[in-house]
């Protein structure tokens, strides 16, 4: 496979990000079991390979202030969840619940497209016991991701297709790429890492807000937290713009020489 194809596959921002909220335990299970199921569910979404970034429930708590966290507790309808996804800066949001219905366990998972405020995938499954629930969780999530986004492309290393050998008498024409495009992709990544606040800075701003005692301290800490969030979003937008432009230049250069 040409080097450029590998480069584009590695750098093109094609996969969305998703925030996976805590699994809500309704009745019949302990909170500890619910927390373990939440971790497994987050890991399953990550292993699907369809998302660029996975924000877990603990990350959500770090990114939201106290007032926003209180609002999350009563957030259930699509419009409210869409606002939450917008606050987190992700295009997809996952909510879930589990509880005992009679002698069986019911699992509900919902994948919400934030910008459209619509449900892209939904699961409602019954299990006889916790062992079936744990085993079935991975299968249900995999099916929901495929339904929402289609089958994942085969990897280069494990692809099942038989490679076609090029004809020795008629070699394929050389493919070129754009140095400017490569530079823009690198500039996009560099701009994000140079301008975006680090995770430790975001966490520190949140801690300062939580520890504020007086109204003046609360206002000052809140303004600082908003400033860092705005800086993060601006850096991400600039980095994405530069990277996308670089990818498009490479695609144009590649096909214009075919």
Image: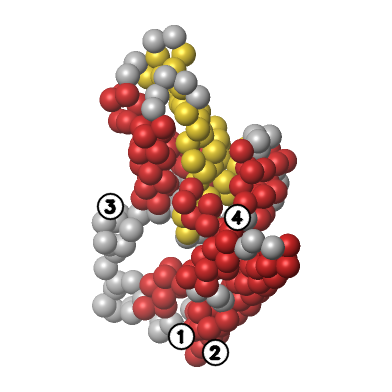
- Please give the residue where the numbered disc 1 appears in the rendered image: 176
Query: Are circles 1 and 2 on residues that touch, CB within 8 Å?
Result: no
Q: Secondary structure at mark 1?
A: loop
- Disc 4 from disc 2: Cα separation: 38 Å
Residue depicted at x 65% and y 50%: 68
Q: Name the foreground residue: 177 vs 44.
A: 44
- Please give the residue where the numbered disc 2 appears in the rendered image: 180
Rate crowding at label 4 as few (under 14), some (14 to 19) or many (20 or more) other CA atoms within 10 Å.
Answer: some
State the image coordinates of residue 88 (x, y, percent, origin top left).
Answer: 61, 56
Left-right relation of 162 to 29 = left
Say the numbered circle drawn on residue 64: 4
- Disc 1 from disc 2: Cα separation: 12 Å
- Please give the residue where the numbered disc 3 appears in the rendered image: 160
Q: Which comes sooner in the sequence, label 4 or label 2?
A: 4
Residue depicted at x 57% and y 46%: 93
State the image coordinates of residue 152 (x, y, percent, origin top left).
Answer: 42, 50
- Disc 3 from disc 2: Cα separation: 35 Å
Q: Secondary structure at mark 3?
A: loop
Mark 4 vs mark 2, foreground winner is: 4
């Amino acid at each position: 496979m040409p080097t450029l194809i590998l480069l584009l596959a590695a750098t093109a921002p094609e996969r969305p990000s998703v925030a996976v909220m805590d699994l809500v335990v309704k009745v019949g299970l302990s909170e500890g079991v619910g927390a373990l199921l939440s971790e497994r569910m987050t890991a399953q979404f990550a292993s699907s390979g369809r998302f660029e970034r996975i924000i877990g429930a603990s990350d959500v708590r770090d990114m939201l202030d106290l007032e926003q966290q209180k609002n999350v507790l009563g957030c259930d309808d699509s419009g409210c969840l869409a606002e939450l996804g917008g606050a987190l800066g992700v295009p997809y949001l996952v909510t879930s619940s589990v509880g005992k219905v009679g002698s069986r366990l019911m699992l509900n998972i919902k994948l919400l497209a934030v910008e459209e405020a619509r449900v892209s995938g939904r699961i409602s499954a019954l299990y006889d016991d916790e062992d079936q629930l744990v085993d079935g969780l991975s299968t249900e999530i995999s099916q929901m991701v495929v339904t929402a986004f289609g089958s994942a492309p085969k990897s280069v290393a494990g692809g099942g297709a038989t490679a076609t050998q090029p004809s020795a008498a008629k070699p394929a024409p050389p493919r070129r790429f754009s140095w400017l495009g490569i530079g823009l992709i690198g500039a996009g990544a560099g701009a994000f890492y140079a301008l975006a606040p680090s995770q430790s800075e975001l966490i520190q701003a949140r801690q300062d807000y939580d520890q504020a005692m007086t109204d003046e301290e609360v206002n000052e800490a809140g303004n600082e937290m908003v400033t860092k969030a705005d800086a993060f979003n601006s850096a991400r937008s600039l980095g994405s713009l530069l990277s996308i432009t670089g990818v498009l230049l490479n695609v144009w250069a590649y096909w214009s020489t075919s």
